[in-house]
Image: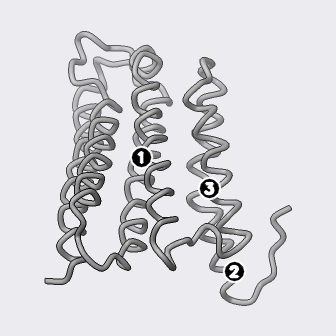
Amino acid sequence: MSVFEFVFSLYSLLFGLALAQVFGGFGNTLQERHKLKVGWLTPLLGLFVILDLTSFWEIGWQMRGISRPYFLFLIATVLLAGIYYLAARLVFPRNFVEWPDFDVYYFRHKQWVYGGILLCNVVAVMALLSVPGARPFMRSPIGFANFLTYFALLIPLLLVRSKRASIVLLILMLSRYAVFPLLVLLAAKGVHTRLF
């Protein structure tokens, strides 16, 4: 087993459990939907967390350049995945009797979810910057714009208190998971795209 496989197995296990929390929340909500006021915020947040967690597998792949499993690196991996697991766990309420209105739940817990995601992404960016050759967002204007757009949407999501503004920001955040890969694909095929 290579060093990367050793570290990536732990990383994948913890992030897989976080994904399972969100999918479980969707499943429980579907089962109890007739008793709940679900709205748009929590399902959109759940989709965002699923896509963002999936993107962390790519970040893990970028880390394959590490030469040995430093203890501090392993601890940082566990803490990063643990924080993201807790954020994913808070996307959906566990007690539907206490939280029958998901919009109320969203605004009561969103700081923990977005704050945890922001912290994880800041740590991930710092980790990527420390690994030679693992700076994908610095290699192209598209990657850099993707990186900037992510944080330009995530920070307002953490702070905004308006339901409508939150929905718009979440839709914009979700759309970037389709737009930027499409731009990368077009650029790879030689189609020149302008970002600005």
> Which amino acid lies under the numbered mark 2 shown in the image of this protein?
Leu
Q: Secondary structure at mark 1?
A: helix
> First in sequence: mark 3 or mark 2?
3
Q: Secondary structure at mark 2?
A: helix
> Which amino acid lies under the numbered mark 3 shown in the image of this protein?
Arg
> First in sequence: mark 1 or mark 2?
1
Q: Which residue is mark 2?
A: 186
Work out how far the residue at label 3 is from the one at label 2, CA to CA, in angstroms.
Answer: 15 Å
> First in sequence: mark 3 or mark 1?
1
Q: Which mark is residue 176?
A: 3
Residue drawn at the location 62% of the way across and 23% of the way down: 160
Compared with residue 117, is residue 77 higher up or lower down, i.e. above or below? below
Query: Where in the figure is residue 44, as x and y percent of width and height?
Result: 48, 38
Residue drawn at the location 21% of the way across and 18% of the way down: 95
Q: Which residue is mark 1?
A: 120
Q: Quadrant of the N terminus?
A: bottom left
For residue 68, what is the image quadrant?
bottom left
Q: Around disc 2, counting alpha carbons within 10 Å, would you say few (fewer than 14), some (14 to 19), or many (20 or more)?
A: few
Query: Where in the figure is residue 73, as x and y percent of width and height?
Result: 29, 60
Q: Are marks 3 and 1 in contact (CB under 8 Å)?
A: no
Residue drawn at the location 47% of the way across and 66% of the way down: 130
